[in-house]
Image (spheres, grey):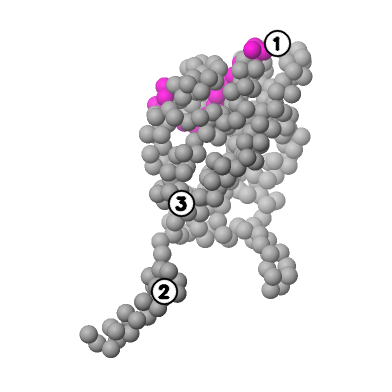
Amino acid sequence: MTIQEIKKIILSFVAFMLLGMPTAQAKTNLGDQNTMAVAWYQTSAEVKALYLQGYNVARNNLATKLATPSEKPKAIILDIDETVLDNSPYQAYNALNNRSYPHSWDQWVKAAKAKAVPGAKDFLNYANEQGVQIYYVSDREQGQLKATIKNLTAEGLPQADREHVLLKQKQAKTKEQRRQQVAQQADVIMLFGDNLSDFNDPAENTVADRTDDVMQNATQFGDKYIILPNPMYGNWEAALYNNNYQQSDSKKSKLRKSHLTYFDPKTNKVKQTTVTTK
């Protein structure tokens, strides 16, 4: 063994002892980065409180909205995933195994094991008793319709049938198209979701346009729009990547960090790295 080879072994050993890793750069693990979001969603009392708060507000609003005359039957539109059904076990699998959607998503949906989020069942059964039409509008695939209805029904959620569960279709791929289909035959009094696209579509899916969309509809939230928590995924993440999920994990990690606004103790200033308004 040469002196150079011995030096390399010694340097590698020292690096391992000091850093707890080989000298080669570790592979980016986006799953690890998502662990805290999934842990908060699954274990915090706060996420349960936010769901209950959203559905309590909706129940309080319902009586007033039903009292307003309309020629059409009253209806509400809800997203499914992280709005009425909790898919965090699927997200936890991804976090633990450094996987991402759509890996095993179809298998999870067809297992029909998602649980109802806090407050959803009680509110929806109350709305059903009041004669409200309930529409579940989701971007799940049409081939997942049977399993989706099975899951909703198993969780005791009303009106979970082919007429009221509207998944992605060739003639109505966007949620807005399906919302308009419902609006043609019903007076839509409330919309529920964990993503802005569950209410309307911002001009562009950028951080700035999404923020502007919220501010333009500020009075709707807590009234017609009921927004629910989801830190695990969504169009907000796509906006960080310029809507390009095909980039490497390393690039995605850098883009996530590049959008952080942070305090620099060296300069005693806050560094704003992303634009949230136009």
Residue 142 visible in image: no
Say if mark 2 contacts mark 3, CB within 8 Å: no
Q: Position of residue 29 (x, y in %)?
A: 44, 56
Which residue is at a point 45% across and 74% down the rendered structure image?
A: 18
Numbered range of the magenta stretch: 129-147
Residue 72, compared with residue 147, is above or below; it is above
Question: CA gap, disc 1 to disc 2?
Answer: 74 Å
Amino acid type at mark 1? Glu
Q: Which residue carries the number 3 mark?
A: 31
Q: Which residue carries the number 1 mark?
A: 71
Q: Which residue carries the number 2 mark?
A: 17
Question: Can you tell which quarter of the image residue 28 is in?
Answer: bottom left
Q: Quadrant of the N terminus?
A: bottom left
- As drawn, the label of residue 157 is none
Q: Secondary structure at mark 3?
A: helix
Which residue is at a point 24% across and 87% down the rendered structure image?
A: 2
Question: CA gap, disc 2 to disc 3?
Answer: 25 Å
Q: Position of residue 31 (x, y in %)?
A: 46, 51
Which residue is at a point 54% across and 20% down the rendered structure image?
A: 157
Q: Residues within 10 Å of mark 2 (few under 14, many from 20)?
A: few
Q: Position of residue 278 (x, y in %)?
A: 70, 51
- The nearer-to-camera label among 2 and 3 is 2
Q: Secondary structure at mark 2?
A: helix
